[in-house]
Amino acid sequence: MSGTRQKWGWAMYDWANSAFATTVMAGFFPVFFKEYWNSGVDAATSTFRLGMANSLASLLIVLLAPLLGAIADCMSRRKAMLFSFAFLGVLMTAGLYLIGEGDWFLAAFLYVLALIGFSGSNVFYDSLLPFVSRKDKIDQTSALGFSMGYLGGGILLSINVLMALHPEKFGLADGAAAIRISFLMVAAWWLIFSLPLMLLVEEPDGSASGWSVNVLQAGFKRVWTTLQEVRQLRNIWLFLVAYWLYIDGVDTIVRMAVDYGLSLGFDQNSLITALLITQFTGFPAAIAFGWFGGRYGPKTGIFIGLAVYIVVTVWASVMDSVSEFYYLAFLIGLAQGGIQALSRSLYARMIPPDRSAEFFGFYNMLGKFAAILGPVMIGWVGVISGNPRTGILSLLVLFVVGGFILTKVNVPDSKEIPVR
């Protein structure tokens, strides 16, 4: 099968699951959780509950990802594992449609399971990158995935926002009904657009053919071996620590931005508009960062993105108007996809491709472990200080220290990996 078809089939999964990241995780769920499922609850408490849900899901992925990655490499089951987690996310997202007003605990429970499906599937999605791209094109291929995600997620979010703003034109009773229908639409979108990856992407054969005690033992053994190797491979270890720090800030802003805006008194329509600005800015920006990383190196591109996030964090702590929120959304759109894409491609350059799911298990583990702390940190600092602006400033240390450690990482030369 041609390399181009595999590359596009792989990138379409970003188009598929970004519907969850935009409409659910960053868009409607924080709003609905605060105003519908936490109706009558003060803003600080609902923010704390949302932070706890995000952190619990991240903790479970931290515990599972490396072992699942090692098993997937042994069995050559990266695609099967990806689809299993994706299907969990699809089912739980659709289930949000059924949750009644005020039932915040059940809503949080389904959301945690959906996040596990989303995050778990990304472990195996990322691990397929070395098999669909040559290393000299890996920055551009990684960026293609993120750009497709921004475009696909933005398109569905635009439709869902129109439904929420004008429910009568869609035959719906009110905005709440429109948001609930949007959860069903995300589930269908995620499922349907996962199919190109399943049909077009190939992966190499593994050493085991099915689930067994031996496969589980081999998985545990490979996790332990990789832990020992990573500790000795200074370059990979430094990158993972740097990534762990700065991606915490990125993920926390993605997950908590709408909630933060609500806490400052901005109306939900303005916040969703800001999210759309981020999405459609991110589409060309991710492609541009991929080109920049291929020409000038991924580290340089990541540093530029971190500088933008430092500006965003400081500005967010003092902003007082919706127009400023729109400007920040534009800046986040410029930097977010670039940092994510170039971090993924830089790491893919450094790891053995035949153990990609295992190594990307650790990559995603550290990213999610960081996300355990970020939302809780913002929530607790906001509660203690009584001011949500204070919590956002704590993210500065993550960007600054993470960037400093990244300066110590040596980027390997580009070496081609044959497209399978």
Image (cartoon, helix red, strand yellow):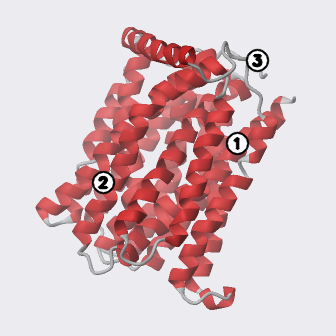
**361, above or below 270, in the image:** above
Residue at image coords 53%, 84%? 175
Residue at image coords 46%, 17%? 220
Tell whether 332 sits left or right of 281: left
The residues tagged by marks 2 and 1 sit, at their Cα atoms, a distance apart of 31 Å
When asked about the image quadrant of residue 173, the answer is: bottom right
Residue at image coords 34%, 39%? 370
Mark 2 belongs to which amino acid?
Met
Q: In this view of the protein, which residue sits in the foreground, 332 or 176?
A: 176
**108, above or below 169, in the image:** above
Mark 1 belongs to which amino acid?
Ala
The number of discs equals 3
When asked about the image quadrant of residue 196, the answer is: top right
Where does the image place residue 184, in percent across and percent down from the top left? Answer: 62, 67
Look at the image and tell me in which quarter the N terminus lies: top right
Q: Nearer the viewer, mark 3 or mark 2?
A: 2
Which residue is labeled 1 in the image? 11
Which residue is labeled 3 in the image? 418
Tell whether 198 sits left or right of 190: right
When asked about the image quadrant of residue 326, the answer is: bottom left
Compare marks 2 and 1 and give the one earlier in the sequence. 1
Q: In this view of the protein, which residue sits in the foreground, 202 or 298?
A: 202
Tell me if residue 155 can be seen. Answer: yes
The residues tagged by marks 3 and 2 sit, at their Cα atoms, a distance apart of 43 Å
Q: Which mark is residue 52?
A: 2
Look at the image and tell me in which quarter the C terminus lies: top right
Badge 2, how many Cα within 10 Å: few under 14, some, many 20+? Answer: some
Residue at image coords 60%, 25%? 72
